[in-house]
Amino acid sequence: MTLNELDKNQTAIIKSINCDSVLKNRFYSLGIVKGATIKIEEVTLTKSTIEININGSKFALRFSEANKIEVENE
């Protein structure tokens, strides 16, 4: 399943990241790496943006970016 399929307040573990190297490097700089625990904090009504919590930091991701992050339930 991908990150954008999770519901608000759901927690998961990152299995893989499937994107180009530029976006992957951005994810890495935010701590979005394989094996990390990630939580969905908020989802916009239009489902265009999601707010995540990773390592105590909150970030917003576009739906299209979240679609590239494979996760498994914790």
Image (cartoon, grey):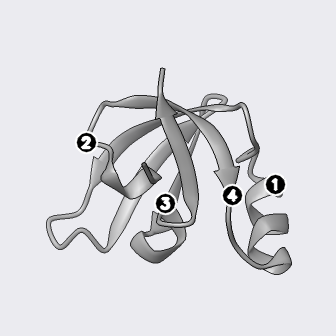
N-terminal-most mark, 3 or 4: 4
Q: Looking at the image, is 48 positioned above or below residue 50?
A: below
Residue position marked by numbered label 1 in the rendering = 28
Q: Closest to the observer: 13 or 45?
A: 13
* Cα distance between the residues tagged 1 and 4: 10 Å
Residue 60 is labelled as: 3
Instruction: Provide residue 47's location: percent of width, then percent of height.
Output: 24, 68
Residue 29 rendering spot, x and y as whole percentages: 83, 55
Q: Residue at x 30, y 31 (%)?
A: 9
> From mark 3 to mark 1, how far is it between C-alphas?
15 Å
The crowding category of the residue bearing disc 1, from other C-alpha atoms within 10 Å (few below 14, some 14 to 19, many at least 20), is few
Q: Is residue 62 left or right of residue 19?
A: left
Residue of label 4: 17
**Mark pair 1, 2: CA separation:** 23 Å
Of tags 1 and 4, the one toward the viewer is 4
Q: In front of the other: label 2 or label 3?
A: 2
The residue tagged 2 is 7
Q: Amino acid at mark 2?
A: Asp
Where does the image place residue 63, in percent across and percent down from the top left?
A: 40, 70
C-alpha separation, residue under disc 2 versus residue under disc 4: 19 Å
Mark 3 vs mark 4, CA separation in Å = 17 Å
Nearer the camera: disc 2 or disc 4:
4
The numbered mark, 1 or 4, whose residue comes first in the sequence reads 4
* Residue count near mark 3 (Cα–Cα under 10 Å), binned few <14, some 14–19, many ≥20: some
**Amino acid type for the residue under numbered disc 1:** Tyr
Q: In what element is the residue under mark 3?
A: strand
Marks 2 and 3, the one that precedes in the sequence: 2
Counting residues from the start of the chain, the first of labels 2 and 4 encountered is: 2
Q: Where in the figure is residue 53, as x and y percent of width and height?
A: 52, 38
